[in-house]
Image (cartoon, rainbow, N blue to C red):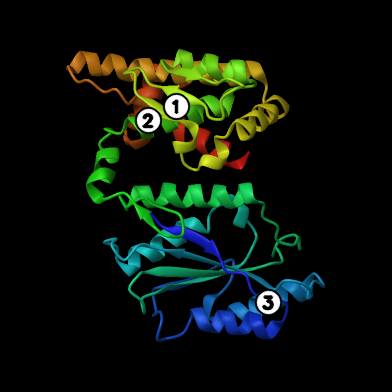
Amino acid sequence: MAIIETINGRNKTYTGLRRVIEYILRDDKTKLGLYSGYNCDADNAYNDFVMTKRNYNKETGRQYIHFVQSFSNREEIKPETAKAIVDELVLFHKFNGFQVVYATHTDTDNLHTHFVLNTVNLHDGMKWKMSKEELQELKDYSDQICRKYNLMITHGKKGMHLNRGEYRSKAKERSWKYELYLVVKEARKYATSRDDFIFKLNKLGYQVNWTDNRKYITFINPQGKKCRNRKLYPPEIFTKEALEKRFELNVQQQNKRIADAKFENLLSAIKLIESDNSMDGSHNNYPLSSMESTSKQDDILNAKQNKGLNWDKEKSRDEEM
């Protein structure tokens, strides 16, 4: 998958803003059809950015934010696909109201897209702010989009890759670790305490070894395979401390009765998939992976339940929290 990085530099002048926009749109790096604008005209982006700043009398401080989404040179991806991925990426909720100009560059071995964001919101004049957690949400959203294109998974700046065979294994629901990741992520979404988290994982068929005298949490899947929390990606959201903070946030932001009802819907959806599998003779040990990947998930859940779990909507709500 793609790596997203921010490029930090001195960017407090209009000269710097003009230069970075001119750079990403250079003819020797991109071409017509591989660049675009979100909430602005790409060919007139500099003027659009400046007009917004002047309208709100916010011409000082940081003038732009510069991101790069890059792909491995081992990845089989066309420039048009890389551009299409960013077309979706700029729809991420954090970009609402902000002007973005972006361009896919084809002048190096690894395909990459630059996107430059105006620091003043077009709609309300608010200045851009992004926490580490929100940056991680953006990266996770990027991964979701890339997964739709069956792209290679890439972790970290040095590009630790899963080979295409391993990725196909994930796509075909043969990865017990990916299923574990989805299970833990769902329990994390609805749990309000450590005990509640462990209870929900037990309900999903997983055992948990979480003790105060051990640094890491160990998860055990229904087949007895073990995995520590530091092996889940991104590891920083699955530490003991991060999980405890998430539980506290859930208490503040969720109605426990509704959260438990949603979790019960998830259990019901899993049972429906397992029931369908038993009827057709198939054996699928990874129902959450199946729910994520199948295009029929809404039909399965909504046809057999009055209030089926809409996986995509639930994922979006989790990202917004």
Identified by mark 2, the residue type is Glu
User: Horizontal and vertical percent for residue 267?
Assistant: 44, 17
List the single residue furthest toward the left.
281
- Residue contact between numbered discs 1 and 2, judged by CB atoms under 8 Å: yes
Q: Residues within 10 Å of mark 1 (few under 14, many from 20)?
A: many
Q: Give whichever of 245, 79 is nearer the camera.
A: 245
Identified by mark 3, the residue type is Arg
Identified by mark 1, the residue type is Val
Give the side of residue 209 with respect to residue 164, left or right. Answer: right
User: Horizontal and vertical percent for residue 313?
Assistant: 51, 36
Q: Is residue 305 shown to the viewer in this render? A: no
Q: Which of marks 1 and 3 is nearer the N terminus?
A: 3
- Kindly identify which residue carries mark 3: 10
Callout 3: SS: loop
State how far apart marks 3 and 2 are (Cα): 43 Å
User: Horizontal and vertical percent for residue 309?
Assistant: 46, 25
Q: Quadrant of residue 251?
A: top right
